[in-house]
Image: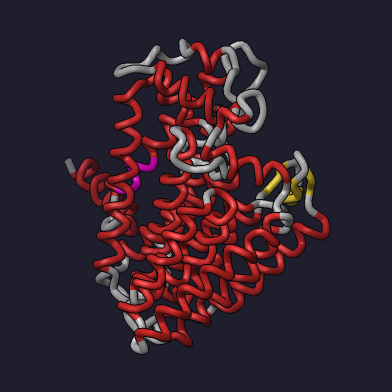
Amino acid sequence: MLQRSFSRIRWKSLAQPWHEVDWLLMVATIALVIIGGLAIRSTEIGLDLNDWEMHATTALVGLGLALAIARWRYDPLVHWYWIIYGLTNAVLLLVLLIGVEANGAQRWLLIGSFNVQPSDLAKLGVIVTLAGILHRRTAKTVPVILQAVAITIPPMLLIMKQPDLGTALVFMAITIGMLYWGNANLGWLVLLGSPLVSTILFVVYLPIWFAWSALMMVVGWRTIAWRWHGAVGAGVINLLSGGLGKFLWNFLAPYQQDRIILFVNPDKDPLGGGYHLIQSRIAIGAGGMFGQGLAQGSQTQLNFIPEQHTDFIFTVIGEEMGFIGCMVVVFLFWLVCLRLLIIAQNARDNFGSLIAFGVLSMIVFQVLVNIGMTIGLAPVTGIALPWISYGRSSLLTNFIAIGLVESIYNFRHRLKF
């Protein structure tokens, strides 16, 4: 009896550092990893590949890192965010100088026998940096908003140079999300992102571009103190952005141009740039309510869909696990996002709250774009589906992010300044 009591006390003391960890959040991410592993394994039937094993191994390492970070106090980062920002940009610059090139992109650093993609970890660097800036001064003034935008531009440009437009867009989503959580005027944030939308719409469809520019004039009228100046300024900026977009269009790689154009009409090039979207929609539609079964999907097993273990992993889930499987994945992501929002609301300080919301912004954008592109609601951008797509750097980054958020939750009542 005494030995049993001693054993309970020992296990309780060992588990004490994780006593207040959000286990619902952790379990949801683990469930997503398991679903991802099953889908990746299904794509490798009959092939001499072991990506699913690497996915599982990386997940175990990531889970260990998340649990370790969860027991460390996050608040010392508030004194190191400029150093973190400097290291983030230095590593991204290093990629352009000595990085490994594959498929026309130079995005990886070779460390030992592994290729690491620093742009994934750079997301966390920018999140911590923006949290460090915005926790001292709210984003209610234009100078603070401009400072946050200026912070984001260098890593974005370095990543676009690789080129990796999809990841660069994630940085924009993180910045807008954190500015919103930092009390920025919502109308200002819409105006902030409007030139990019105008640039794309000008190339894709002119009538929608005119309508968008008119809408931005209304937003400027309603949200800026000097109403006529705001309306005219918003309209002029969006109109000019359309013309500038025509100029910047030539700086995009040909495959990036195709992704934007074929998003509107993939049938224009069914055997080329539109092939991904067409085959993806066929596969998801073929899954029906309950799916064709693991390793039974015709589109998946015959390899009709390129990159189906990475960017288009949701297509495999749709075909082989059906509508029910897709809804389970969507529910798990909803649960993760809900827990992240609750942690952001209940954080002990603004710094922790902003980090949690920055991670939430990163996850939401990646999920919406990845699932959207597989069903034809978003252009193909090469953004991975968190915890499900194969990708060691992405998987580790997401687990580190969860560990950081778990630390915020774990120490929400125990911080001492």
Snapshot colouring: secondary structure
Q: Quadrant of residue 333?
A: top left
- Residue 198 pos. (x, y %): 52, 61
Q: Quadrant of residue 289?
A: top left
* Residue situated in front as seen by the camera: 379 or 268: 268
Magenta stretch secondary structure, dominant? helix
In this orientation, does residue 33 appear?
A: yes
Q: Does residue 337 appear to the left or right of 119 in the view shown?
A: left
Residue at position x 59%, y 18% in the image: 304
Vertical order, 115 against 132 (above or below): above
Q: Residue furthest left?
A: 1
Residue at position x 52%, y 22% in the image: 41
Q: For residue 138: magenta?
A: no
In this orientation, does residue 70 appear?
A: no
* Residue situated in front as seen by the camera: 62 or 258: 258
Vertical order, 82 against 154 (above or below): below
* Residue situated in front as seen by the camera: 169 or 9: 169
Q: Residue furthest right?
A: 98
Residue at position x 52%, y 16% in the image: 299
Q: For residue 26: magenta?
A: yes
Quarter of the figure with the N terminus: top left
Q: What is the number of callouts on the image?
A: 0
- Residue 414 pos. (x, y %): 28, 72
For the record, the magenta segment spans: 25-29
Residue at position x 55%, y 66% in the image: 125
Q: Does residue 83 appear to the left or right of 218 in the view shown?
A: right
- Residue 379 pos. (x, y %): 53, 42
Quarter of the figure with the C terminus: bottom left
- Residue 103 pos. (x, y %): 75, 39
